[in-house]
Image (cartoon, rainbow, N blue to C red):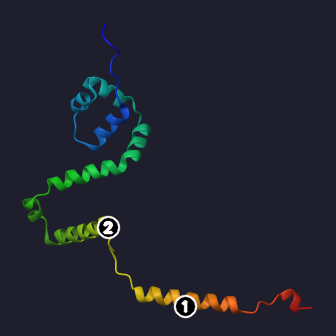
Amino acid sequence: MPGPAPTVDIDQAAKLRATTDLSLADIAAIQKVTPQAIHKQLQSLDGKAMLDKYKQERADCLAGLQAEIIASVDAATINKARLGERMVAVGVLYDKERLERNQATEIVDHNLIIGIAHNLGAIRSQIEDADVVDVEDASE
């Protein structure tokens, strides 16, 4: 007597479908179910459920697309781009690299910040040292 039929892991199936180029047959093989079972379960998700799944997995979806786009870029593709497009791409990639390395991506005038902090300290001291006058008491 055969055991219970394997069930589809809908979360995994939706994530794999959204973040990879795996076919239904590939996903079915991973889950040890039929491609029809995967298709049926994915069809059962309504638009809102698919949107919710996408929102939960958005970072993974975007990372998958980035990897796919990067893999598609070769020297010939780069050379086909206009010089301005290549320069913008270099700038964007430079900024993203620095973000990934936790390095600054913009110039900050540290002297200005130090000056503002010093001025705030002086103002705070003046406020603390000021004589407080109660307006109601002064009018009597």
Residue 5, quarter of picture: top left
Residue 22, quarter of picture: top left
For the C terminus, the quadrant is bottom right
- At numbered mark 1, what does the secondary structure look like: helix, strand or loop? helix
Classed neighbour count for the residue bearing mark 1: other residues with Cα under 10 Å, few (<14), some (14–19), many (≥20): few
Classed neighbour count for the residue bearing mark 2: other residues with Cα under 10 Å, few (<14), some (14–19), many (≥20): few
Q: What residue did someone put label 1 on? A: 119
Q: What residue did someone put label 2 on? A: 99
Q: Residue at x 27, y 23 (%)?
A: 33
| Residue sitting at the far right | 140
Looking at marks 1 and 2 on the same chain, the residue that comes earlier in the sequence is marked by 2
Q: Residue at x 31, y 48 (%)?
A: 61
Q: Amino acid at mark 1?
A: Asn
Residue 89, quarter of picture: bottom left
From mark 1 to mark 2, how far is it between C-alphas? 31 Å
Would residue 8 appear left or right of 35 to someone viewing this image?
Answer: right
Q: Residue at x 33, y 13 (%)?
A: 3
Q: Amino acid at mark 2?
A: Leu
